[in-house]
Amino acid sequence: MPDPLTPLRILIIEDCESDHDLLMLKLREAGFAPHSLRVETVAEIREALLRDDWQIVFSDFDLPGFDGLLALEVVRQSNAEIPFFIVSGVIDEEQAVATMKAGAQDYFFKGKLTRLGPAVSRELRESEQRRQRRHAQAELDHDRNLLRHDRIRFVDVMSHEFRTPLNIINVAAGMLARYGERMGAPERQERICEIQDAVTRMTRVIDKVLLTSRIELHQWSLRPERFELAAWCKEFLAHNTGSLRERERIRVRIAGLPSAVTWTCASSRFHCRTCFRMP
C-alpha cells in the first residue's frame, strides 16, 4: 500500500485559478493532501488569516494592486512564524533577494517546481521545531515565575518564623539586662528558658529548611534505628512546647509501650520518617 498523504492546510495568494490548480497538483505528487483557500486581495488575506490556522502560505509576486512583498508584510503582521513561499513566473533575481531578506522562506518559478515538495517538508519540520522551542521557553518562563513567587513566599514565611522568637529573645534579654539584679532566681531562670526556647525554635526551622534542601538534592540517606519510645516522647514534648510554665502544666502518662521500637530516619535525629516497626 502507498504511504498515506500528509494533510496540509495552505493559504494561496493567487489571482490565476489554473496556477492554483498546478500548485495543488505538485503538492499531491510530493505526498501531501492539501486543503487550500485561494485569495486575491489584501482584505481577503487578512480575513483568511483570522479564519484558520494555516500551516504554510504560497503567494504570487505580481498581483492586482499589490505585490508579494506587501502580501508577506500582511501575513507577518498576523503570524510571524508561518512559512511563506513566493511562487511566480515573473519574479527577477533582485525581487527574489528582496523577498528573502523581508522574511520569505523560499521562492519558486512556476515552471520549476521540482524542489517544492522537499522545501515544504523542510519548512514544516523547522516550523514544528520553532513551535516546540517556543513551548519549551514558555514552560521555562512559567517555572521561573513560580520559582520567583516561591522564593518571595519563602522569605515572607522565614521572616515570620524568625521574627517571633527574636522578639522573645529581645524582650527576655532586655528584662534581664534591666532588672536581672532585682529578679529572683526562678524569674531569672524563666527568662533564660524563654531565650533558650526561642533559640531552639529557630534552630528547628533551620533544620527543616536544610533537610528539605537535602531531600530536593537527594543528599540524604535512610537508616534503621532502635530507640526508647517513651524517652523520645518526653524529649519531643520538651522541644515542642513553649515556656517553662507551659511544660509544667503538661502531665504525661506513658503506659503499654514496647521497650524499644525501630524506625527509618534520615541523618537528623529530629527529622525522621515515622515508619515504626515493633520488635
Image (tube, rainbow, N blue to C red):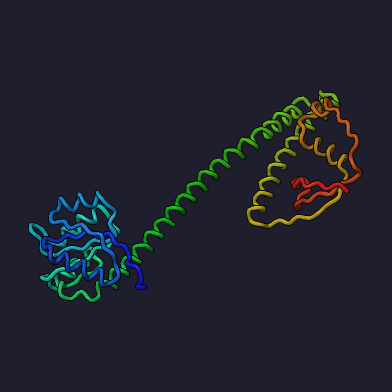
Relative to residue 270, is residue 61 drawn left or right? left
Residue 53's spot in the image, x, y percent? 29, 54
Relative to residue 153, is residue 222 drawn left or right? right
Residue 194's spot in the image, x, y percent? 76, 31
- Vertical arrangement, residue 193 with respect to residue 65, above or below: above
Residue visible at 12% across and 71% down in the picture: 89
Quadrant of the rendered image containing residue 243: top right
- Vertical arrangement, residue 256 with respect to residue 140, above or below: above
Quadrant of the rendered image containing residue 228: top right
The tally of labels here is 0
Quadrant where the N terminus sits is: bottom left
- Vertical arrangement, residue 261 with respect to residue 165, above or below: below
Quadrant of the rendered image containing residue 107: bottom left
Q: 177 or 12: which is nearer to us?
A: 12
Question: Residue extending furthest front?
Answer: 1
Q: 174 or 63: which is nearer to us?
A: 63
Residue visible at 10% across and 70% down in the picture: 90
Relative to residue 230, is residue 99 drawn left or right? left
Residue 257's spot in the image, x, y percent? 89, 39
Residue 24's spot in the image, x, y percent? 21, 66
Residue visible at 85% across and 37% down in the picture: 234
- Vertical arrangement, residue 170 with respect to residue 215, above or below: above
Question: Residue extending furthest left?
Answer: 65
